[in-house]
Amino acid sequence: MKIKSDEITTVIRQEIEQYSGKLEISEVGQVVEVGDGIARVYGLSKAMAGELIEFQGSAGRVMGQVMNLELDTVGCVLYGDATSIREGDTARATGNLLEVPVGPELLGRVVDPLGNPIDGGPAINASGRQKVDIVAPGIAARQPVKEPLQFGIKAVDSMVPVGRGQRELVIGDRKTGKTAVCIDAIINQKQYWGTPEAVVCIYVAVGQKDSTVAGVVETLRKNGALEYTIIVNAGASSAAPLQYIAPYSGCAMGEYFMWQGKQGKTPKHVLCVYDDLSKQAVAYRELSLLLRRPPGREAYPGDVFYLHSRLLERATKLSNENGGGSLTALPIIETQEGDVSAYIPTNVISITDGQIYLQPELFSAGIRPAINVGISVSRVGGNAQISAMKQVAGSLRLDLAAYRELEAFAQLGTDLDTASKRQLDRGARMVELLKQGQFRPFDVIDQCISIFAASRGFLDDVPIVAVSKFETGMLEYFRTQKAELRAKLVASKSFKGIEDDFKVAVGAFKSAFRA
């Protein structure tokens, strides 16, 4: 077959035009020292702070991140099997920052802080990737917090209400029910799933036992809450760099959903639980000391405040121009012997918009959730409550505080006047009413009806042991015989104009209950 010379010329011309003469240049360094999840690398003079570095270890590729920029070397933390890296191995600068997979494909899955599945399920083909550490939205991109985020816990929703976009610290000694309060909040979001008000939940476990995390996963699955939850696990056996990065990874996964509102999509509301940031601070202290950064108070590095503030600042309620999405943060901090004045607790208290303080003494006395209403506070307050709750719970905190003082006084055996006795009786019944079983969130309308009955004195002469039975019966009565009246409260979210009807209805139920 004859080929014409002009055809050959055309083919050669096309090949020359399509040829890309790009030369790939990458900066390569050498590992000088490695150990405890830290590597020192010589020769990466152009490396940036936070840049990803690729190490070629004996067992394959391991990623690291630049944390220290020194005169001749850079200090890197390693996100992988550090034992496979040896002195003299090569390290290549990638020019990229750390990213994690994001998208609805992660819902219902348990992943590590790098977004790899660790639940034995299939690989995750995520919609996209997002940078782990970013600057929080500015003031102009936000709006005030005013939509309630219902926990389903009477003591929280009535006295320390949390709004969408708020940062509410959950603090207390170990084994006082901090995780249980947050898991209740996640389970309570089930009522919104599939609606425009849907909330995606992210549970970040830092330094927890794998058996504890498995228990949380099982609880969420049993209660039908796993379908809208992502679990990020950096367990106690994980390396310190992974425990340090886990909360930022969880936050980045949440921000993907928060910005969906700008594209007119749902869900656009997110709840992030960081369990717990005390262990993240300990992991960060370990990294810092290994990187030879100077120790400060309690041996923590000077930037440990910045560690938590740059994470929690990312919780926000976006302005309507940005889609009106929100990211609510529930950081958990563990105290030692109730010492809330320690370094890390005071740091996080000053960053957040209030705290829920759980007291061991209340927990031991059977008052669960063991919320101390004296120290617990919400700086958003009534803005994050429906009108009906504001109307019935306005004086609740003061009543309980007065009851605690009177109770201490009454223990001295002093004779009390009638008014004080009445206050003691009402306080004791209110405390009983606020007790709640674990993983049994209450609908906000049911909470309003219960607190209405107690605050208007209908429980004052009901025996304390019968308070729970009275409440269950009354709520059932309003769902069946008085469903029409309850529907009015659901529609208006206020007792205005129907308060007298409710008084009559509760009175009628009480007469039947006594009989």
Image (cartoon, helix red, strand yellow):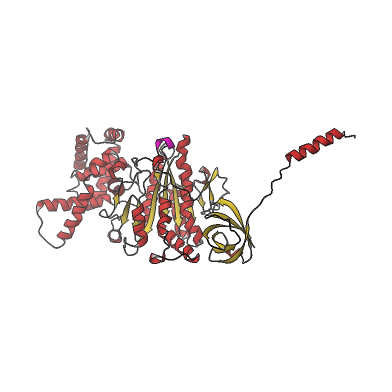
**Viewer-nearest residue: 76 or 22:** 22
**Viewer-nearest residue: 264 or 234:** 264
Residue 78 in sight here: yes
Query: Residue 169, how many percent across, how many down?
Result: 35, 53
Direction from residue 41 to residue 267 in the image, left or right: left
Direction from residue 485 to residue 73 in the image, left or right: right
Residue 474 in sight here: no
**Viewer-nearest residue: 207 or 91:** 91
Query: Residue 491, how many percent across, how many down?
Result: 31, 33
Specify the segment rendered in magenta: 319-327
Residue with the most extreme front position? 71
Examine the image and state in which quarter residue 338 appears. bottom left
Q: Residue at x 59, y 65 (%)?
A: 83
In the rendered image, the quadrant that contains the C terminus is top left
Query: Residue 165, how many percent across, how many down?
Result: 38, 44
Q: Residue at x 36, y 57 (%)?
A: 347
Examine the image and state in which quarter residue 358 appears. bottom left
In the rendered image, the quadrant that contains the N terminus is top right
For the image, the number of numbered tags is 0
Residue 7 to residue 89: above or below: above
Direction from residue 297 to residue 493 in the image, left or right: left
Query: Residue 398, how many percent across, how many down?
Result: 21, 50
- Decide whether residue 494 is among the magenta residues: no
Examine the image and state in which quarter residue 62 appears. bottom right
Residue 479 to residue 372: above or below: above
- Decide whether residue 322 is among the magenta residues: yes
Direction from residue 230 to residue 28 in the image, left or right: right
